[in-house]
Amino acid sequence: MQQYVFDFSQGSKDDRDLLGGKGANLAEMTSLGLPVPPGFTISTEACRAYLATGSEPDGLADEVERNLADLEMRMGKRLGDPSDPLLVSVRSGAKFSMPGMMDTVLNVGLTDSSVSGLAGKAGDERFAWDSYRRLIQMFGNTVLGIDAEHFDKAMDAVKRDRGVEADVDLDAADLRGLVDEFKAVVRRECDEEFPQEPRRQLDLAIRAVFDSWNTERARIYRRQERIADDLGTAVNIVAMVFGNLGPDSGTGVAFTRDPATGEQGIYGDYLPNAQGEDVVAGIRNTLPLADLERLDKTSYDQLLGFMETLERHYRDLCDIEFTIERGKLWMLQTRVGKRTAAAAFRIAGQLVDEGLIDEDEALSRVTGAQLAQLMFPQFDPAAERTPIARGMAASPGAAVGRAAFDSATAVAWADAGEDVILVRRETNPDDLRGMVASRGVLTSRGGKTSHAAVVARGMGRTCVVGVEALRVDPRAREFATPDGVRVAEGDVISIDGGTGEVIVGEVAVVPSAVSDALGGEPLPDDVDDARRQVVDAVLRFMRHADERRRLGVRANADTGEDARRARTLGAGGIGLCRTEHMFLGSRRKVVERIILARTDEQREAGLDELRPLQRADFAEILEAMDGLPVTIRLLDPPLHEFLPDLTDLSVKVAVAEATGQRDHESADLLAEVQRLHEQNPMLGMRGVRLGLVVPGLFQLQVRAIAEAAAELRGRRLDPRPQIMVPLVAAVQELEAIRDMAESTVAEVAAETGLELRFPIGTMIELPRAAMTAHQIAQAAEFFSFGTNDLTQTTWGFSRDDVEATFFPAYLERGVFGVSPFESIDAEGVGRLVSIAAWEGKETRQDLELGVCGEHGGDPDSIHFFESIKLDYVSCSPFRVPVARLEAGRAAL
Ligand code: PEP
Ligand code: MG
């Protein structure tokens, strides 16, 4: 019989698949001997079975019963016993942490009859009623699906009546009255009574946690974070300990290092006389953890000891949730904590220095996505800025945008192409869409562990929280400072996620220190220690990644400037030099003349005009990449890009005719353009097809490459061009171009007296090319996978259209979790790549294999290309460091 329920003494931190992160770590802390309240975990398998069938799997109810009985025995109380009730929390916990996304219910087991038993045993009437009202509120909201607002309204009304600000100022009688109000809310909204059987409460709560896996906000979060939809969540049933038992009780969150900056030390928030959810929800402003030393030194010292134990055990930054019940410290949760990109690098560096991890492990803990974030610009330190307020720097970066006061507005404006800053008092999971759409998030309440802070950090959004000076009025859609500065919806503001500053208007941004350092620039003298440590760690792990990686990293660059930038960022050559950009502006006209030429002379004249220009283009790039391979792709774009616009021309001719002035030249041109017009230009006269049909065009390019190389050789440089033919589907196409190219290079060699020979290869970007790789490799010295076109043609997706049309629906329906244009579709497109790579190598052992589609700079795709042992990836210059880092990680 399958086991679905596991006592905390049965698991370990390695059981996250089965027990979820929270359950696995509770088990681990239990076996480390830390004070964890007893409890048990219902496995993710049970959740998956439930989600698949809509009902609890056979045997689950009995197993829960047995484990509950065991728990009752150990605690010496029975669930919901009227005289001395055992209460439990029911907590979600998936394999990957999804902060605030799923449900938790505390105080399960309280009923009209057990509330007085609890009061009697605790000797505290107020506490018992406070716990009961919390149960009804949480249960009502998460299990019964009642809008939280109904409970908030009732709570606000009582506070108003009593003339108090905070919930802690309500006394037992107030809370008792509130319980009646809350029960009335349940009756009104659900047409049923708040359930009074403890076991039924438990079963409903378990079911609600299972169901919460599939709420909309959880699904959006998973898509963002690329968490698989079919994992399911575990459910943890834990004996309650109480932080709301008076001033010697409380609850908090702690980090073993600062998750925002990576600074060593003890960080966190503490809230006296409160239950766990109050801290994360940011409902009351918390105290810094250091204040606990003053309030309860014994617990504080003990906590520090546990934190050290955990950090040494996990060898990483841990975050912790704890509760103090009348002076007794309980550990409720731990996990390897989320952190900002800067903190990730800095902490990994510190841990290597402390001897806790080696450089390989450090490299596995930092990601290309984090590096990309650090390469984001920051506010210009020299720019004029007068902050109107300052809060906590919760997630770094520099964000500028128009203030939006609710999620829907933020999404609407972002969809219209505006930069937005979402401004809220505090955020809750319903704000997720708005946060995703915004450049940054600003809240007036909450600490570094509030929902806004945790989620923004995870997403890499700039975030400033707890700006207490701001009075945010979501209804009036404005915020104001005590000095009378008002910011209305739509006004531009800037927020600094590094300092916590809020500024009215736009502040100029400058490139990041990490980017500069990666480009070889020394750090300015006045840079602070924190930034220096981050930069040092980045450079250190880049070095290590370069030592480790097998994959080469080249750049997609088509100007001398891009080539130089790519080289300073560590590119080992150019994997794709697109030549079409060299035919824009006035040169486009010349190509038009070449294509439309009626005589050889006309065509020759055009070609002669272009050749010196192309030679200079190539010479500049080859010089910038001296000694490194430069893969130059012959002209690829669809024909119509070089012809006059059909509509414009038709209008011109029609107007001329209407006014009686026949324009013969335009009319002839129109006829020609109509003749060449294509319904599907991306599947039409492009690439090698253009090269085979328009005489002299590719030859001109090959000659220009050969002449540029000869010129550089004359200057004792070492140019290494590779000639690449685009959009090949059949080996015959490639053979024809190859013959032409070889004889052209031979001509230049003869003219210059130099020995010239360049590798000639092809893009593999059509399924037929991939499927006939055996043959194509006979004519190609290298393959470069054009995964953009290969994705387009394999799926039959128009790469220029689909992301704006039906992709959102496809993502929503889970056809794929991420666009196949962004991350390689390993099963389909990737399979073609791997078949072609394999067959190509069978024909030609030394065939060089690279990728030059956008996927060359995407972390997941890089890991795939490593797994099929390609030789290099090529990506935009800015992504080169990211690709180097990921290539190193992929090789670990
Ligand atoms: C490709 O198709 O992947 C490619 C690199 O070529 P382009 O994007 O220029 O079509
Ligand atoms: Mg292409």
Image (cartoon, rainbow, N blue to C red):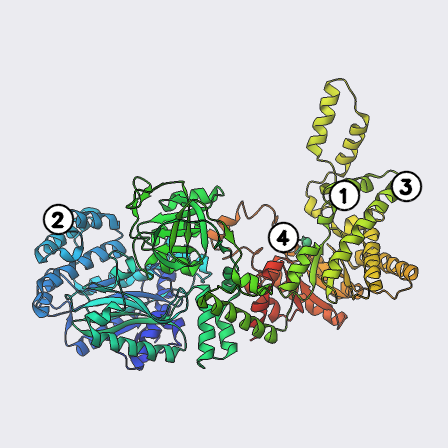
Foreground: disc 2 or disc 3: 2
Foreground: disc 4 or disc 2: 2
Mark 3 vs ligand 1: CB below 8 Å: no
Count neighbours of disc 4 (C-alpha within 10 A) and say few if under 14, some if 14 to 19, many if 20 or more: many
The numbered mark, 1 or 3, whose residue comes first in the sequence reads 1
Task: Identify the residue position indicated by label 2 in the image.
Answer: 163
Between marks 2 and 3, how big is the CA–CA gap?
95 Å
Task: Identify the residue position indicated by label 1 in the image.
Answer: 587
Label 1 with label 3: CB-CB less than 8 Å: no
Q: Give amino acid for label 4.
A: Gln
The numbered mark, 1 or 2, whose residue comes first in the sequence reads 2
The numbered mark, 4 or 2, whose residue comes first in the sequence reads 2
Find residue 769 and report its image quarter. bottom right
List x then y, in percent, for residue 500.
38, 56
In the rendering, which numbered label is found on residue 792? 4
**Is residue 492 positioned above or below 664 on the image?**
below
Foreground: disc 1 or disc 3: 1
